[in-house]
Amino acid sequence: MELKIDNKNLKKNQEQVKEIIAVSPQETAIAPNLTVRENLELMAGIHGYKKMEVKEKTGNMIAAFSLQPYENQKSKTLSGGWQRKLSIALALISE
């Protein structure tokens, strides 16, 4: 059996596939003791963005998901819905 995403073989082209997909697990994938902003900055850093890009990507996700009122709040204190929004923003920060 062969699995393809965007006509790319999943086993043979793992790096190319990783560039075009994002994952948002059913359970929220957030660091509960970090703030919303810190979670986003961490994920942008993991994806290899430079310091200025990290700030830009983080700001864009905060704006896109209306997270401004919560950006300095520990993510464990967010409601389930806001945690889910943050988890989706984390998945999409890599574009």
Image: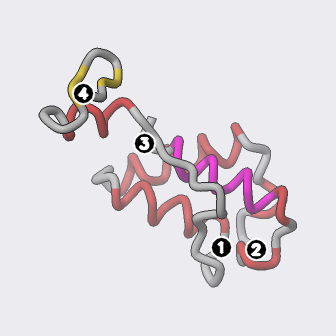
Image quadrant where residue 11 sits:
top left
The C terminus lies in which quarter of the figure?
Answer: top left
Using the numbered discs, state the Cα–Cα distance from disc 2 to disc 3 in whole angstroms. Answer: 22 Å
Name the residue beneath numbered marker 3.
Answer: 94
Q: How is the image coloured?
A: secondary structure
What label does residue 73 carry, if any?
A: 2
Q: Give the number of the mark in front: 1 or 4.
A: 4
Taking depth in this image into account, of 6 and 33 the one nearest to the observer is 6
Vertical comparison of 4 with 63: above or below = above
Name the residue beneath numbered marker 1.
Answer: 35
Vertical comparison of 83 with 3: above or below = below
In contact (CB < 8 Å): disc 4 and disc 2: no
Vertical comparison of 26 with 77: above or below = above
Which residue extends farthest bottom? Answer: 33
| Comes first in the chain, label 1 or label 2 | 1
Residue type at mark 1: give it: Thr
Residue type at mark 2: give it: Gln
| Comes first in the chain, label 4 or label 2 | 4
Q: Give the number of the mark in front: 3 or 1.
A: 3
Q: Residue at the spot x=61%, y=47% of the render?
A: 89
Query: Residue 34, image x and y in percent?
Result: 61, 78
Q: Give the number of the mark in front: 3 or 4.
A: 4
| Comes first in the chain, label 3 or label 1 | 1
Q: Left or right: where does residue 82 sit relative to residue 39?
A: right
The N terminus lies in which quarter of the figure?
Answer: top left
Vertical comparison of 45 with 7: above or below = below
Please tell me how crowded label 4 is: few (under 14), some (14-19), or many (20+) other residues with Cα within 10 Å: few
Q: Left or right: where does residue 37 sit relative to residue 73?
A: left
Taking depth in this image into account, of 86 and 13 the one nearest to the observer is 13
Name the residue beneath numbered marker 4.
Answer: 2
